[in-house]
Image (cartoon, rainbow, N blue to C red):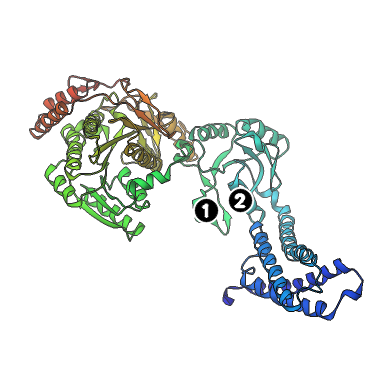
């Protein structure tokens, strides 16, 4: 304990003991004035010594000297208040046992409490004020050399950033104003910096600051969950105004965002442009779904599967079984899980979902309570080129996993689906729709107590996932361009992998509760679709380059199986509301289990015979909305 107290802490300790004794004497003076007849030796000398010794013991025991006066705050005031109150109570008890409080007026403890609070708290906050004012004076000559910035967001992160600047003699920025997302804080000030308007008034605020000689050169976003559409709008406006745009590190990243105790701004990332405000999550229901359950994840080494592993590991499952057909991907996620949750019982098993015998034996051995089926072939053009492989993995493989769940008595199977399964123009989308239909039919038949429940969750593109457009753009940009876009009007829904998996878990908890009709598909609210051409231009601008001048964007035409617009609902799927804002419900399109089971058996036989035409014919029967023209996939928009 003693070794942890700095030298200045001992000085503060001596100061506080002196102040404690002085507070008792001052309290007597405030009560009796100059009437010396009341000042007995017992009360004056012995009382002062007793009060000082009690204060010394309490102050030291309460750890008041581990704080730094320079950063005295409300927490320090609360600690002082607690310590002073305890000192007064102990002193009263001591004086009662000693002299029965006969010569101590009842008002003295109350007077002493206020006096001691002032004598302990006052010097601390005066010291902080002095240090802050001295820094302000020291910084004043250098202030004009700093880069003027305008903050977006008038919350805690903005306050922290401004405060960090006032404490640094070599800070790079000076804040000339703040924009708020709401009207409530306009006109108010944070550490002397005015909230000049709302975000929609960016143009006007910048021109007003320009007339005052304080034109900002950079726009800094202070919130880490700002709506992507708003960020894209701010990027466009700031570019027109000749300003760069950055953001503060997320609160969870502040440690890595500190350089020499200064908060450093970071470039805007694509996740900021495409992100959306965080949907409130029901963590309790997610934990209830996972906690103490044996969980198995297929495709555990993929983008979605890997994130499922990370998030589920934090919800205290009894065990976690990782299944993947790729040795390297399985090795990588198993090593990561070992570091993330070393005490969690886990197994890493190599298996191909297309092998029903292997999957059946595996499930009977593991006997999972909960299965997340994320294994799939997802890259549309590649699946178009490898039709048999795509159908065997996505359709037949999903049926194999579902059948194994029923045989092994699994409680819930969650199928990870895609928006490409709606009005599909690709083999990938059609194969996922077959998987949805089979799971829906099984759920409608087995939706009774102690039977396997099936939950299908459908969503769009995941940022940074294997084969997605974002890593492709970044790779093309690093190579000097051009960035390739299939069509100027192509739009896609985007979601971060973290948010997608959070909502998958929440939808799974919702589907397992039995509150909704059997066979429904849970659809994640993807927000507004983003035009890929605009996204390409924003990638270039985020790199500090000019689209069309420094880096070109070229149109290469739609690839096999692609369509211009993705959809999340089919016309025949009536929307049903759920209690969670980020999750929608697609009412099922009835499918006869016997018929679809027979068709999938025929599909498997056609694939094993390498009869692609027969396989596609079966798929067209199962998914009538799958549009094809002969052997050529229709490339029209949905």
Q: Is residue 142 visible to us here?
A: yes
Q: Residue at x 45, y 31 (%)?
A: 548
Q: Position of residue 527 (x, y in %)?
A: 43, 31
Compared to residue 204, the image places residue 413 above or below, namely: below
Q: Which residue is the site of mark 2?
A: 160
Instruction: Please state the horizontal and vertical placement of residue 180, each as a whole percent of the image.
Output: 62, 37
Q: Is residue 45 above or below residue 561?
A: below
Q: Give the image location of residue 515, x and y in percent.
A: 35, 34
Label whose residue precedes the other's in the sequence (2 or 1): 2
Disc 2 element:
helix
Q: Are marks 2 and 1 in contact (CB under 8 Å)?
A: yes
Alpha carbon distance from label 2 to label 1: 11 Å
| Of residues 485 and 93, the one drawn nearer to the viewer in this rendering | 93
Element marked by disc 1 = loop
Label 2 packing within 10 angstroms: few (<14), some (14-19), many (20+): some
Can residue 169 be spotted in the picture? no
Q: Residue at x 33, y 48 (%)?
A: 290
The quadrant the C terminus occupies is: top left
Q: Position of residue 372 (x, y in %)?
A: 28, 43
| Quadrant of residue 131 within the rendered picture | bottom right
Q: What is the number of callouts on the image?
A: 2
Residue positioned most to the left: 609
């Amino acid at each position: 304990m003693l070794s942890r107290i700095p030298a200045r802490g001992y000085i503060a300790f001596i100061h506080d003991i002196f102040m404690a004794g002085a507070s008792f004497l001052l309290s007597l003076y405030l009560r009796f004035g100059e009437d010396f007849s009341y000042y007995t030796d017992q009360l004056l000398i012995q009382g002062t010594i007793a009060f000082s010794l009690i204060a010394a013991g309490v102050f030291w025991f309460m750890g008041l000297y581990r704080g730094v006066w320079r950063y005295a705050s409300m927490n320090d005031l609360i600690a002082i208040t607690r310590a002073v109150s305890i000192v007064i109570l102990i002193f009263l008890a001591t004086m009662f046992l000693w002299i029965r409080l006969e010569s101590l007026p009842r008002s003295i403890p109350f007077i002493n409490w206020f006096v001691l609070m002032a004598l302990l708290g006052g010097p601390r906050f005066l010291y902080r004020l002095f240090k802050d004012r001295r820094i302000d004076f020291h910084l004043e000559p250098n202030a004009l050399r700093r880069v003027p910035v305008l903050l977006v967001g008038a919350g805690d992160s903005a306050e922290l950033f401004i405060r960090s600047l006032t404490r640094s003699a070599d800070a790079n920025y000076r804040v000339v104003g703040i924009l708020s997302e709401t009207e409530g804080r306009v006109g108010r000030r944070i550490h002397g910096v005015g909230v000049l308007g709302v975000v929609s008034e960016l143009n006007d605020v910048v021109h007003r600051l320009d007339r005052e000689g304080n034109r900002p050169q950079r726009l800094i976003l202070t919130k880490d969950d700002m709506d992507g559409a708003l960020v894209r709008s701010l990027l466009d406006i700031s570019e027109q105004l000749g300003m760069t745009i950055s953001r503060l590190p997320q609160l969870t990243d502040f440690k890595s965002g500190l350089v020499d105790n200064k908060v450093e701004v970071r470039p805007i990332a694509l996740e900021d442009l495409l992100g959306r405000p965080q949907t409130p999550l029901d963590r309790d229901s997610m934990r209830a779904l996972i906690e103490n359950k044996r969980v198995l994840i297929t495709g555990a080494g993929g983008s979605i599967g890997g994130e499922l592993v990370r998030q589920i590991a934090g919800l205290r499952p009894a065990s976690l079984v990782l299944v993947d057909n790729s040795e390297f991907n399985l090795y990588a996620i198993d090593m990561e899980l070992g570091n993330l949750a070393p005490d969690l019982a886990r197994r890493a098993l190599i298996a191909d979902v297309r092998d029903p015998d292997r999957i059946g034996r595996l499930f009977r051995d593991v006997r999972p309570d909960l299965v997340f089926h994320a294994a799939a072939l997802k890259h549309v053009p590649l699946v178009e080129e490898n039709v048999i492989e795509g159908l065997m993995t996505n359709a037949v493989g999903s049926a194999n996993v579902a059948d194994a769940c029923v045989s092994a008595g699994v409680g819930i199977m969650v199928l990870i689906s895609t928006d490409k399964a709606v009005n599909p123009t690709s083999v990938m989308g059609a194969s996922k729709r077959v998987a949805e239909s089979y799971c829906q039919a099984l759920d409608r038949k087995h939706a009774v107590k102690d039977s396997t429940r099936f939950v299908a969750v459908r969503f769009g593109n995941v940022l940074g996932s294997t084969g997605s457009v974002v890593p492709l753009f970044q790779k093309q940009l690093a190579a000097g361009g051009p960035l390739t876009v299939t069509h100027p009007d192509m739009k896609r829904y985007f979601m971060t992998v973290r948010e997608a998996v959070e909502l998958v878990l929440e939808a799974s908890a919702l589907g397992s509760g039995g509150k909704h009709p059997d066979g429904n598909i849970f659809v994640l609210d993807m927000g507004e679709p983003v035009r890929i051409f605009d996204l390409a231009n924003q990638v270039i601008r985020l790199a500090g380059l000019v689209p069309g001048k420094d880096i070109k964007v070229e149109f290469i035409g739609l690839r096999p199986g692609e369509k211009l617009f993705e959809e999340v609902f089919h016309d025949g799927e009536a929307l049903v509301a759920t209690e969670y804002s980020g999750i929608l419900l697609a009412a099922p399109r009835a499918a006869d289990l016997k018929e679809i089971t027979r068709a999938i058996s025929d599909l498997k036989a056609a694939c094993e015979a390498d009869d692609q035409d027969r396989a596609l014919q079966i798929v067209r029967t199962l998914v009538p909305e799958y549009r094809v023209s002969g052997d050529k996939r229709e490339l029209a928009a949905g």
